[in-house]
Amino acid sequence: MKLKLLTPIAMLLVGLAMQTKAQTGRPDKLYSMSGIGFAFPMGETADYLKPKFSTSLGINLGLGDGGLFLYPKVSLHAFEFNQITPDAGYTYTLQKGRATTYLLNVALGYRKIVNKWAFYGFAGAGGGFVLTPQAGVNAQTLQVTMDNKTNGMGIFEGGGGIEYNIGGANLFVEASYMYGFTKIQNRVFNTVPISIGIKPNLSKLLSKL
């Protein structure tokens, strides 16, 4: 399932890189983005999820000559999962399991560059799936069978960040709000991801090819 999601993303990155190579103009035409941090469950989401170490991957593609950019991002968040009610066909609730997200958000953003600093905001929507663990117990054989439930999820995500230029890349800190349109454990899914990371400036790299 990971491969099915990541393959079209890789194709998108290649296509955008080829398009950017043929274009000139603004110095921030194309960045790749890699971040690490935590996604903090909000409200009733905290009833069944707790934050664990997470990652995110994306690109920033400049639009026109101003500060607008397209921001596709994949959220690979991880959580501790504490089940409240068992899923259909299961008797027991699973505690301290691991839930993971594979969510793609495509946002429109605006970046303002001031010397070595940059400030940006974005908003968009997308979707994907959230994997939650399940445990089936066979009392006769004393065996536990682990499985994952795939929860399809549409999302809205908006946020902002700060960047600092270090030459061929920018260091960044980013925070956002993510709202899910599908309930898990009969409760809303919403989180506040906070990440830090690096954005290499691929525009400069491609201009040398």
Image (cartoon, rainbow, N blue to C red):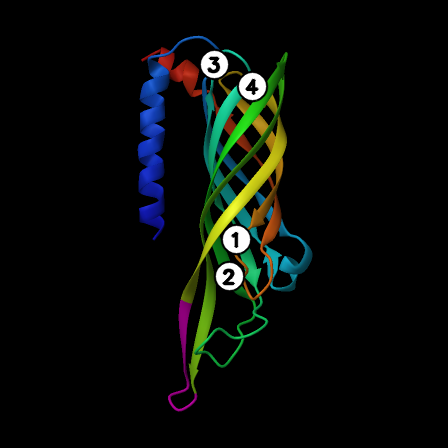
| Residue drawn at (55%, 56%) of the image | 79
Q: Distance between the residues labelled 3 and 2?
A: 42 Å
Vertical arrangement, residue 92 with respect to residue 104, above or below:
below
Measured as percent of width and height from the top left, residue 82 is found at 58, 67
Q: Residues within 10 Å of mark 4 (few under 14, many from 20)?
A: few
Q: Which amino acid does label 1 sit on?
A: Ala
**Quadrant (top left/top right/bottom left/bottom right) for the C terminus:** top left
Q: Nearer the viewer, residue 10 or 182?
A: 182
Residue topped by disc 4: 166
Residue topped by disc 1: 78
Contact (CB < 8 A) between labels 2 and 1? yes
Q: How far apart are marks 2 and 1 (CA)?
A: 7 Å
Q: Distance between the residues labelled 4 and 1?
A: 30 Å
Region rendered in magenta: 139-147
Contact (CB < 8 A) between labels 2 and 4? no
- The nearer-to-camera label among 4 and 3 is 3
- The nearer-to-camera label among 3 and 2 is 3
Q: Which element type, helix, strand or loop, lies under badge 3?
A: loop
Q: How crowded is mark 3: few (under 14 residues within 10 Å), some or many (20 or more)?
A: few
